[in-house]
Image: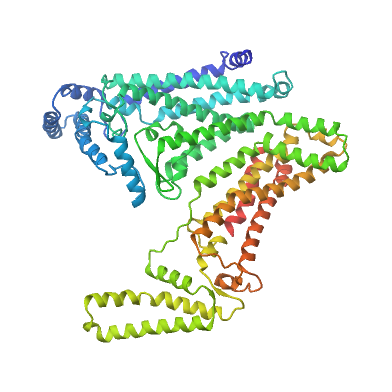
């Protein structure tokens, strides 16, 4: 507790930092007020006009109020009155109340009700069942007009949130980099409390500041908006606010606003921890500030530009900056497709954020204890009395502990597993065209050795279809409608049958070639994959290996213990040899995590059992007759694994040239990713 008080006094002394924080707070208040009185959205509804009109119809029956406002709207349009926009806004709010009953009935009767969801029959049926269960207790008659324009605008994600985010960034900048500016970092590492406890105290102090300042900014924003728009119906249900019809529960506006503010503060705590992690990694003031600005801009760009549907939707839904977009997170039940099961977006985000938050804290405190790990290595090497073999075994063990525990390697491997689990979509064969379906059926039927007997059967089947086609052309008028349709369906087999006959002719020219379903084998080898999934796996694998290796190779230099390691009996040479071995081991581990799920799922989805056949059975590999399909597949994944190991070793070369951690990671990853993209 004393350390926390000390850090608090150090950070909060009245100097330039406090003046800047006060200026940012005043700026957030001014922006909230400016946005309230100078509405920039399409409605351009002014507060004074809105208050006057909403009060005039507040206790009136909705249908009568709508008729009254429609007449006034027509009149104001003809006369050019400035209250037209406010009139239109109030009318839209009334229509929102009127339409809620139909909206709720649709949900209770099994309709999707317009909720965001993928258009898949099995998934949609589960969404409808879920909605019926969630909304069955709601009563539309309780939803009444509440003149809630002020609450609607308050809950929007706007410029004020960006100002608060900048304030959080500045707090982190002050807390983390103050030692770098005053050259006190090395003294803190050697103090009684140590770096780890000091880092914890700093994080707690920043956490308190973020909670207080964010809460203050949000409360002032609430007061400004509700005051300007004259809102007082705190007991009304949240569904009366435009944009929140999908909320699955009878929450009053007052209670929902409290939840909103709490989640807003929690969101900025998450963002604060992310900024704190980046600052702890870099330390240097200028690089820290620039890196956090660039990373924030990149995340914002991805969040705004990536659509909420398609293969890249995950990067928008679960973008870290969504933590402060409560308008998106809390507008109501939003069903996401998670392996054909509907999962509430808000709940999924909370679980994802909690895992990421814990992992970030683990990495932050591992970084702060990394120098202790290196020092422990040096002391243990000096005291070791074993022979050379015992020392070699010890070096491998300790380097693995140092990189996995102190360097955050275990957390990185965990994230790799999570990433594979989240991003991985089991391959499903698309047989939308009848020709694709029939071709697959023929391949399965004649699978195996391409014998003369099979070729004759295929030729006879094709000749029968040719005869049927000629007869249909000559005597088509004699066919009944049902017979003509049956003949037409049968003729759809001609194209796939011709393809497999050509394939069998090709196989006759190759040794030990079998009739195989090429699509599955090509997917195993990384060819013809929708979305280039295996390419993304390769890129992810390189990133994971680089992140694990960077601490292992650079820890001694970054914490100033490389000189101590050189002064030991065996020096850095033995240590570096063991690091090379560990890079190979890490490459194998990452390859198992990344590639094994893909191999298993492709094997389940496709016919890939004939691994003993010649690789030339696949026309793409027509020149590789001396190897089997299994051998080629095995070699392709061995090459991928070796490439991962080499990526880790390349980190050493880059680290010696650029020294900095972030630059080492960035350059190593880019250099080792470029060949994957260009191939």
Q: What quarter of the picture does the C terminus occupy?
A: bottom right
Residue 14 in sight from this viewpoint: yes
In the picture provided, is 609 more to the left or to the right than 477?
right
Q: What quarter of the picture does the N terminus occupy?
A: top right
Whether 229 is drawn above or below 366: the answer is above
Residue shown at 52% from the left, 19% from the top: 208
In the picture provided, is 60 more to the left or to the right than 634?
left
Q: Position of residue 365 (x, y in %)?
A: 63, 28
Give residue 579's quadrant in the image: top right
Q: Position of residue 467 (x, y in %)?
A: 35, 85
Observer-nearest residue: 123 or 576?
A: 123
Give residue 185's quadrant in the image: top right
Give residue 274's quadrant in the image: top right
Observer-nearest residue: 88 or 317?
A: 317
Colouring style:
rainbow
In the picture provided, is 151 more to the left or to the right than 550?
left
Whether 411 is drawn above or below 512: the answer is above
Residue shown at 54% from the left, 25% from the top: 170
Q: Position of residue 194 (x, y in %)?
A: 70, 22
Q: Position of residue 148 (x, y in %)?
A: 27, 26
Whether 281 is drawn above or below 190: the answer is below
Observer-nearest residue: 305 or 314?
A: 314
Residue 649 in sight from this viewpoint: no
Residue shown at 44% from the left, 20% from the top: 215
């Amino acid at each position: 507790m004393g350390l926390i008080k000390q850090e608090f006094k150090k950070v909060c002394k009245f100097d330039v930092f406090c003046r800047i924080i006060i200026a940012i707070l005043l700026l957030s208040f001014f922006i909230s007020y400016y946005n309230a009185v100078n509405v920039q959205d399409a409605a351009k509804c002014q507060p004074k006009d809105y208050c006057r009109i909403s009060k005039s119809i507040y206790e009136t029956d909705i249908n009568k109020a709508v008729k009254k406002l429609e007449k006034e709207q027509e009149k104001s349009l003809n006369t050019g009155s400035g209250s037209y926009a406010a009139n239109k806004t109030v009318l839209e709010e009334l229509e929102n109340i009127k339409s809620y009953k139909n909206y709720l009935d649709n949900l209770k009767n099994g309709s999707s009700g317009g909720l965001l969801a993928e258009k898949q029959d099995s998934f949609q049926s589960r969404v409808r069942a879920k909605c019926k269960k969630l909304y069955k207790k709601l009563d539309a008659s309780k939803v009444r007009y509440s003149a809630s324009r002020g609450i609607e605008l308050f809950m929007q994600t706007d410029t004020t949130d960006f100002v608060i985010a900048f304030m959080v960034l500045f707090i982190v900048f002050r807390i983390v980099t103050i030692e770098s500016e005053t050259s006190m970092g090395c003294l803190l590492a050697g103090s009684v409390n140590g770096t780890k406890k000091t880092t914890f105290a700093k994080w707690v102090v920043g956490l308190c500041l973020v909670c207080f300042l964010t809460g203050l900014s949000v409360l002032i924003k609430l007061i400004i908006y509700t005051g300007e728009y004259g809102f007082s119906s705190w007991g009304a249900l949240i569904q009366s606010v435009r944009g929140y019809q999908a909320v699955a529960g009878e929450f009053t506006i007052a209670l929902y606003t409290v939840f909103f503010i709490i989640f807003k503060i929690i969101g900025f705590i998450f963002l604060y921890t992310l900024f704190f992690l980046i600052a702890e990694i870099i330390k240097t003031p200028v690089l820290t500030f620039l890196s956090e600005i660039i990373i924030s801009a990149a995340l914002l760009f991805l969040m705004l530009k990536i659509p909420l549907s398609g293969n890249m939707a995950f990067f928008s839904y679960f973008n870290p900056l969504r933590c402060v977009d409560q308008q998106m997170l809390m507008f109501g039940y939003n069903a996401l497709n998670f392996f054909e099961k509907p999962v509430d977006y808000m709940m999924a985000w909370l679980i994802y954020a909690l895992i990421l938050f814990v992992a970030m804290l683990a990495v932050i405190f591992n970084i702060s204890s990394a120098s202790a790990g290196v020092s422990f290595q040096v002391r243990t090497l000096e005291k070791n009395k074993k022979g050379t073999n015992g020392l070699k075994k010890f070096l491998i063990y300790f380097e693995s502990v140092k990189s996995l525990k102190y360097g955050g390697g275990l957390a990185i491997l965990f994230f790799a597993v999570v990433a594979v689990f989240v991003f991985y979509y089991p391959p499903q064969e698309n047989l939308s065209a009848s020709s694709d379906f029939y071709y697959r059926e023929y391949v399965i039927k004649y699978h195996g050795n391409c014998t003369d007997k099979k070729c004759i059967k295929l030729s006879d089947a094709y000749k029968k279809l040719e005869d049927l086609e000629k007869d249909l052309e000559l005597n088509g008028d004699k066919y009944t409608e049902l017979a003509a349709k049956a003949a037409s369906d049968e003729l759809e087999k001609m194209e796939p049958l011709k393809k497999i006959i050509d394939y069998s002719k090709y196989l006759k020219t190759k040794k030990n070639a079998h009739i195989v379903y090429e699509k599955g084998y090509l997917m195993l080898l990384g060819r013809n994959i929708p979305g280039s999934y295996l390419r993304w796996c390769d890129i992810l694998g390189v990133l994971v290996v680089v992140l694990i290796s960077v601490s292992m190779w650079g820890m001694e230099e970054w914490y100033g213990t490389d000189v101590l390691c050189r002064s030991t009996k065996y020096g850095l040479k033995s240590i570096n040899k063991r690091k090379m071995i560990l890079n190979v081991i890490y490459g194998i581990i990452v390859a198992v995590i990344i590639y094994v799920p893909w191999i298993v799922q492709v094997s389940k989805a496709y016919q890939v059992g004939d691994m003993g056949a010649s690789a030339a059975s696949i026309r793409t590999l027509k020149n590789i007759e001396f190897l089997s399909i299994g051998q080629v597949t095995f070699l392709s994944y061995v090459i991928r694994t070796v490439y991962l190991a080499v990526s880790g070793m390349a980190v050493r070369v880059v680290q010696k040239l650029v020294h900095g951690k972030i630059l080492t990671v960035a350059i190593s990853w880019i250099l080792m990713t470029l060949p994957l993209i260009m191939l």
